[in-house]
Every structure is written in structure tokens, then in C-alpha cells.
Amino acid sequence: MKLPNNPLQNKSYDLALLIVKLSKKLMAEKKEYVLSKQILRSGTSVGANIVEANGAISKADFSAKMSIAYKECLETKYWLHLLKDSDDLDLVDFNILFEKADEIGRILFSILKTTRINKQS
């Protein structure tokens, strides 16, 4: 589901794929079902909300969906930290996933800042 003119959607899709693979690995190898489901929900929700934002019917709707995507991104980073600190996720995988989530979060924050500034004008 790559879109040539939508790098944020592509980045969030790539993150979601990695999160799906991580969740499967955690369940199969670590028999870890609670945290794996939590990160699966939040990590795949980021991209889903970005897709919804791109189909928004108003600026307010767009901003609301991007805000949800940002919050889901923050939650994903929380679960990544928890998985790493509980020794269910090694440092190499943590660093790869966290950097991707953090980059998406920075982009989303910038978009939210811009949409809120434009809303006030």
C-alpha cells in the first residue's frame, strides 16, 4: 500500500509491518501475549489514523485524526521501552523500531503544530 506522494503514510505503513512481525515473534518465541497485543494495536493504529486523516472531510477532522495518530505513536514508543526494559525486545530491534516511531512522531507533531497555527489565523 505504498503511495508515491505520501512519505508519512509510507513510513507509518513500514512501521506497522515491523510491529506486526514483532508481535508475531513475541507470541511465538517469548509466549508474550499481553504486551504484544498492546503494541500491535497502537503500532498499527498510527498508520490507520494517518490514512483516515488523508480522507478527512474537514480541517478539524484532519487535525483530530492526526492527533490520534500522534498519541498512538507515543503509546507505541512506551510499549517499545517496556518490552526492552523487560528483556522481551533486544536493543538492536528496539533502536530500529524506536527511531522509526520517533521520526513519525516528530513529523506528526510538526503537522499538528502547523494545522493548529493555521486554524488560529
Image (cartoon, helix red, strand yellow):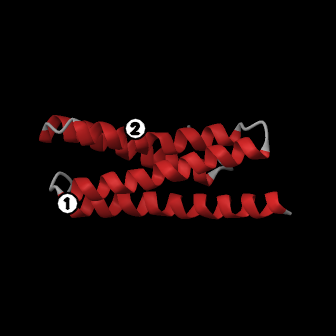
The total of numbered circles placed on residues is: 2
In what element is the residue under mark 2?
A: helix
Of 55 and 120, which appears nearest the observer?
120
The reply to whether residue 104 is visible in this rendering is yes
Q: Residue at x 68, y 64 (%)?
A: 113
Amino acid at pointer 1: Asp
> Where residue 35 appears, x then y in whole percent?
26, 42
Crowdedness of circle 2 by 10 Å Cα count: few (<14), some, many (20+)?
A: some
Label placed on residue 41: 2
Give the spatial CA distance, label 2 vs label 1: 20 Å
Left or right, 77 with respect to 87, comes to right
Amino acid at pointer 2: Arg
Residue wearing tag 1: 85
Crowdedness of circle 1 by 10 Å Cα count: few (<14), some, many (20+)?
A: few
Residue 78 quadrant: bottom left
Residue 33 in the image: above or below residue 101? above
In what element is the residue under mark 1?
A: helix
Q: Residue at x 64, y 37 (%)?
A: 52
The reply to whether residue 11 is visible in this rendering is no
